[in-house]
Image (tube, coloured by chain):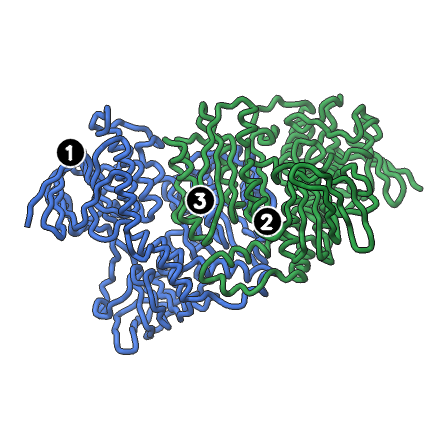
Chain colours: A green, B blue
Amino acid sequence: MAQQTRTYDVVVLGAGAVGENAADRAGRTGLSVVVVEAELVGGECSYWACMPSKALLRPGAVLAAARGVGGAAQAVTGGVDPAAVLARRDAFASHWDDGSQVAWLAGAGIDLVRGHARLVGPRRVEVATGDGALTLVARHAVVVATGSEPVLPDLPGLAQAVPWTSREATAVHDVPGSLVILGGGVVGVEMATAYADLGAAVTLLVRGDRVLTAAEPFAGRAVGEALVGLGVDVRYGARPTGVTRDTDGVVVELARVGDAAGERVRADELLVATGRRPATGDLGLATVGLEPGSALVVDDALQVTGVDGGWLFAVGDVTGRTTTTHQGKYDARVVGDVVAARFGPGGSGAPDGAAPWSATTATADHAAVPQVVFTRPEVAWVGLTEAAALVAGHPVRTVQVALRSAAGAALAGDDVDGTVQLVVDTEREVLLGATFVGPEVAEMLHAATIAVVGQVPIARLWHAVPAYPTTSEVWLRLLEAYGR
Amino acid sequence: MAQQTRTYDVVVLGAGAVGENAADRAGRTGLSVVVVEAELVGGECSYWACMPSKALLRPGAVLAAARGVGGAAQAVTGGVDPAAVLARRDAFASHWDDGSQVAWLAGAGIDLVRGHARLVGPRRVEVATGDGALTLVARHAVVVATGSEPVLPDLPGLAQAVPWTSREATAVHDVPGSLVILGGGVVGVEMATAYADLGAAVTLLVRGDRVLTAAEPFAGRAVGEALVGLGVDVRYGARPTGVTRDTDGVVVELARVGDAAGERVRADELLVATGRRPATGDLGLATVGLEPGSALVVDDALQVTGVDGGWLFAVGDVTGRTTTTHQGKYDARVVGDVVAARFGPGGSGAPDGAAPWSATTATADHAAVPQVVFTRPEVAWVGLTEAAALVAGHPVRTVQVALRSAAGAALAGDDVDGTVQLVVDTEREVLLGATFVGPEVAEMLHAATIAVVGQVPIARLWHAVPAYPTTSEVWLRLLEAYGR
C-alpha cells in the first residue's frame, strides 16, 4: 500500500454541513483546504436527521392545518399516503447519494479525501483510505467537525435486540405496524409524531414527567398532551429494565416506578433516542494530549483549549456546546473567519482579541441559540429559558400570553391553541429568551432571535408593528402584558 | 327633542379598532373618555375588511398548501366548501353584531355615544343621536378616528349600476357566478383570490402594467401571474369608459388602450376597489378652520397641524398617513400616550419635545410600516422599497434571493416559489426595508420589522441564527448575498 503525504493550509475533519461551511469560509480567502469524510458528504443532517425527519413530518402538518379550518376541512378525506411520504423523503435525502455535495465541494475549490481520519500529532492527520494510508499535514489549522453519535443506554439485551437509532427511523423504508420509542427529547417526539402520521401504533417511553425537558415546562407539557391526541401511548416515569427481541418483534420491560407499573411493551421495532455524544472516540486525540471520547472544549473563537500552538479548532456537535445543524454552521462561519483572519493574507497567526459579537467571536452560542421542534404543536425557542436566566443571575420577568389572543391566530385555525412567552431582563429591558408553542410557529421564531441578538429594548419593540391580522400580533399582547 | 351637553376629558370620534385603542390608552391614566360611533363598534376592519377578508382567504390557502406537498396532496379531494367558508366568515365578522365590542368598551370604562358626530367649534362636538342632538365638550382633546371611505371613479353609469365596494365583497352571502373587479390594489387582488376560491369566474381590471403598485415590482408581477394560475382573467392597461347594468348583470366597457382592445366585460357583479379617501367630508371641519374632505394632517404626536390650542388629534386612515388597521392602532397607542402625558395626572398640557422612537412619537410611520397581502403567494413588506429609499436619498444596496434557496422552503412545499429582498443602507449598514413574496411568508415579516425598527446592523444580524430547516434560513442567503 502506498504511503502518501499531502500538505494543506487547513485540514477539516468531517464533511457534514458544519465541516462544509467551515471549509468554504476558510477557503474563500485563498487558503488551501481539504476535508476528510468517512461516510456521505453532507453528513447526518442531510441524510439521517433534519432533512428526512422534516420531510416525514411536513405532509401530516399541512393536512392537520387544512383539517383545522372550516370551509377547507371537508376537502381533506384521509391521512398521509405513506408510500408518497417516503418517496418525498427519499428525494430530500438525495437518495443517500452525495454526488451533488461532492460537486459543490469541487466547485468551491475544496479537496475531498474519503476515509477515517485520526490525529497523529500536532497538525498531522492520518487517513485510512481504501487505497492505503494518507498523511495530511496542516500548515495552519485542523478543524474537527466530526459531529456526534447516538448513545445506547446500558440496558440488558438492548444491543442484541438491534434497536433503531435516529438513522434507521428517518431512513425507514417499511413502516412497522408498531414502534416503541425510548426517550422524550427532540428525536423522540418528532418521530412519535411522524410514525403516528404514517399509521404505526406508537408508544413513547419518557424517563421524567414531561417531554422536551430542555424547553420551558409548558412547551413539553403541550407536546406531550398533543401526542396523546395523535394516538401515541405516552408513558411518563418509565424505567426500562431490559429488552428482548423475538420473532414477533421487540419487548421492553419496564420497572414498577411511579405511575408506570411493571409492564412489558411490545412493538415491531424499538427506537432508542436517549441522547448523543461527541464523536471523538477514534480521532487520535491522545496524540495531542486530549482525552478520547470527550467533547472538544473550545473558546469563543472555536479554538480547542488545552492544546498549544493555536492550530486545533472544533465546531458543531463535537464541541458539546451545540447540538443543532444551524448553530454548528454558525460556529463554522466563525471558525472559517477566524482561520482566514489568523492565517489568510495579512493574518498574524495569533488571536486578535476580538470583542463579543464580532465576526470572529461565537457570542450567540451563549445568548441566542434557536431550537425548533416540528411536532404538532410546533415548539420554537431561543435564548434563555426562565429557569436558565434565573440561574445565570439575571433580573428576570416572564410574560406569557395565549396564541389565540392574536386575531390572526384564530383566523389561521379554528381551534388554535398555543402559548408564547418572553423572558425579559428587567434591568436592561431587553429580551433574554422567547418560547413559541403552537401550530406553524417555526417561522415566528426569527423575530425573537433578532430581538435577542440585537438587544433591542422593549421600548423600541413597541414601534415594531405586527401586521393585522397575523399571528405575529401576539407580540403586542406580550408587550401589553409586560407593560410600558 | 332634548338638547344635552356632556363634558369629558377626551372625545374620540370613531369606534373602529383605531378609535378603541386611542380611547383605551388615553383612559388608562384616569382621564374620562367617550367615543362616538355612527355604525358598528369595531369598525370597518372587524366587519367589512381585515377580519372577513382573511376569513374568506384562509381555507383556500391551507388547501393549496396541502395540495403542494407530496404525501398529503392525494388526501385533498376538492376545493373549499363555499357555504362553510361563508359561515366561518360570519363568525369572524361576529355576525355583524357589535355586542362584544360594546361590552369591551364598558369594561374599559369608556362611554359610548351612537350617532354621527360633527365638530361645532374648538373642543365641541355635536352628535345627531336617535334621541336628539347631544353636545360633547372635550376638556382636553378631541381625537378623530373616523377612517376612510371608498372612492368611486367618475365613470358613466357606475353609480346606477350599484357596484360593490369592499363592504359588499367581504360580507357577501350569495357568491355570484362571475365578478369583475376594478382595481389591482390590495382589495382587488385579495378579493380576486377569494372569489376564485369560491368558484366565481373573476375578471380583474388593472389600470397599469402590474398589480400592487405600492409594493416592489417583482411582488406585483408574482401576484399577477399567480392570479392567472388561479383562473383569474387579468387585464392590464384597462381603461373603463362606462358601466351598465341589465337584468343579466353588469357590463364594463373598456377603451382600446395598450394591450386591452376595446371590449366589454360582463359579470354578475362589479366590485370597485380603486382607492379610499379620508372620511372627513361631514365632520364639521370648517368650524375649526379646516377643509372638509381633506386628510387631517398631523405631526408625529398625531396632533392636527393648523389648529390652535393643541386639542385636536387624528389617527388612522383619516390622517392620510396610514392605510392599515395595525398602523392606525400604533398611532392610536401613541396618541393615547400623548394625551395621557399632556393631560393626565402631572401633565403639562403642552408638547414634551419627545425624541424619535419615544412612546409619544409615531416614528415608525416614516420608517417601518408593515403590509401583508393574503394572496397566493402572500406578499409582505416593511419599510422602504428600493425606489422609495433612492428617492429619499439613502445610499442603497438591494439584495434578492429565491425563497427556495432555503432548504426549509423546499421542505414546506414541493414547488415553492418566491423571492425575498432586503434594502440596505450601505452607510449605516442597517436595513431600510424588506419584501417577502411566497407561500405563508406573512409570519416571516416581523423579523424584518424588528431589524428595521431596532436598526440592528448587518454585522450583528450575522449572529441571529435561523433554525434549520426553516424557511427563515433565507436570512442567511440574504446576508451572504450582501457579503460580510
Picture residue at 31% right of the left edge, 56% below the top: B48
Q: Percent x, y for residue A119?
A: 82, 31
Question: Which chain is indicated by disc 2?
Answer: A
Image quarter (top left, top right, bottom left or bottom right) of the N terminus of chain A:
top right
Same chain letter for marks 3 and 2? yes
- Circle 1 is placed at which residue position? B139
Mark 2 element type = helix
Q: Amino acid at mark 1?
A: Arg
- Circle 3 is placed at which residue position? A472
Instruction: Give residue A63's quadrant in the image.
Output: bottom right
Q: Within 10 Å of the Cα at label 3, are there few (<14), some (14-19), or many (20+) other Cα atoms?
A: many
- Circle 2 is placed at which residue position? A228
- Mark 2 vs mark 1: give the one in front: 2
Q: Amino acid at mark 3?
A: Ser
Of the residues under marks 3 and 2, which one precedes in the sequence?
Answer: 2
Q: Amino acid at mark 2?
A: Val
Q: Percent x, y for residue B352?
A: 26, 27
Mark 1 element type = strand
Q: Is A303 on the left or on the right of B183, as rendered? A: right
Q: Is B312 on the left or on the right of B230, as rendered? A: left
Instruction: Give residue A282's quadrant in the image.
Output: top right
Q: Within 10 Å of the Cα at label 2, are there few (<14), some (14-19), or many (20+) other Cα atoms?
A: some
| Residue B233 visible in rendering | yes
**Residue nearer the viewer, B173 or B158:** B173
